[in-house]
Amino acid sequence: MLPYGRQSISDEDIAAVVEALRLDYLTTGPMVERFETAFAQRIGAKYAVAVCNATAALHLAMLVAEIGPGDRVITSPNTFLASANCAAYVGATPDFADIDPVSYCLSPEALERAWQPDTKAVVAVDYAGQTADMPAISDIARKHQAIVIEDACHAVGGQFEHTGKLWTIGNHPWADITIFSFHPVKTMTTGEGGMLVTNNPAYAQRARQLRTHGIVRSPSEFVGLGDDTLDERGPWYHEMQSLGYNYRITDFQCALGLSQLKRLEQFLQRRREIVARYNKALADCPLIAAPSLRNSSDRDVTSWHLYTAQFDFARAGITRSEVMQHLREQGVGSQVLYIPVYLQPWYRKQFGYAPGKCPIAESFYQRALSLPLYPDMTDADVEHVVACVQNHEAICT
Ligand SMILES: Cc1ncc(COP(=O)(O)O)c(C=O)c1O
């Protein structure tokens, strides 16, 4: 079965992990900092903080931005739950503005309409690897002194052109914090893993502290235990100055991350080749729309985490489940990404959200189907998926 996404693990990746397992550290050791440094260098950002998954990184982003009860955080409904859940973790209200019909990312116009006086942050999601319109989103947020977090979990290695210049996701002036995921279906993997990237030293320092229980080890920052007789500051001494978490990533995961980072260009290139082949094939199917790009610059590098096409199931006279079943019978997996987050029962119950809130995201969801896309797909695999779609009478006539 060809899954909709999967990791690519080479012999070099395996050797790198095995080598790390032979070292003294299993949890935080030298590989963590090496991975952070290499990742920051790759995207040109000042600080990268590696954590156990991107959900934890989103939670840390909320904490370092001091979002809390009484605040509203607006995100895209077309995303994985974590982009919104992070606001709920800190007691803020997750809210949603509709998506742009071309990029399927947060629409700046809808964001402006959804803005409320208590909105303190925006989580803009780079759906499928295409960057959201960060300059326009940031203009709105800055006007209201709100923080911009870019959920770039789908967009490791992505770049986009704006005013004639090429900007790298994770290092441009329109996001305060950027979050990446290294889950196995993403562009590169550490098994589970995530990265918080920022050019703000205070955010980075705070994220590092909260990643390990809010512990401070630097003597210059100590405030004491409140009793001189108990305050002996020997080599064991540390202070917990805020409520933190165990969001650490392991050394061997970072060894895998370092090895995968070396292969990132190759991954991106192969994803682009597969997307080009799918786009060409689907052009022959009038009831299927290939994913569209907001920017048409040839210089853009879209990470292409997903290949989500829009199928007109109603006109084809077939349900999505039937199409998925047809594909499955021929060894082709597919997936539906995403159910608009605010329609999830918890969100409806907790915040009173109802169908109709974001009509474009709802219509996108009804037509969405993601076809297999991952770097280890062979040309024959790609041709097989294309043939299964093209030879289906109802969906490609
Ligand atoms: C857009 C988006 N944000 C956040 C996450 C959470 O990432 P992780 O699984 O690393 O916690 C995901 C993962 O699926 C995602 O797709």
Image (tube, helix red, strand yellow):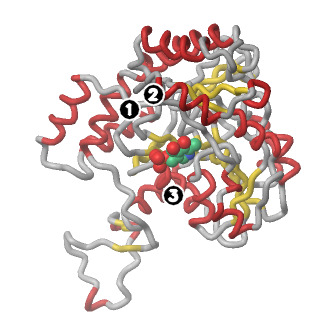
288 sits left or right of 153 in the view: right
User: As drawn, which residue projects farthest toward the right?
Assistant: 113
Disc number at residue 38?
Answer: 1
Residue 325: name its quadrant: top right
52 sits left or right of 4 in the view: left
Q: Is residue 210 visible?
A: yes
Q: Nearer the viewer, residue 229 or 257?
A: 257
Circle 1: residue type: Ala
Q: Residue at x 48, y 59 (%)?
A: 206
Q: Residue at x 60, y 39 (%)?
A: 337
Disc number at residue 60?
Answer: 3
Q: For disc 3, does the CB lie below 8 Å from ligand 1?
A: no
Q: Nearer the viewer, residue 212 or 316?
A: 316
Give the structural element (helix, strand or loop) at label 3: helix
> 158 above or below 90?
above
Instruction: Give the Cα distance between marks 1 and 3.
Output: 21 Å
Circle 2: residue type: Arg
**Position of the C terminus by quadrant:** top right
Q: Nearer the viewer, mark 3 or mark 2?
A: 3
270 sits left or right of 137 in the view: left
Residue 133 picture location, percent across and down: 74, 33
> 89 above or below 276?
below
Disc number at residue 42?
Answer: 2
Residue 42: name its quadrant: top left
Pointer 1 with pointer 2, Cβ within 8 A: yes
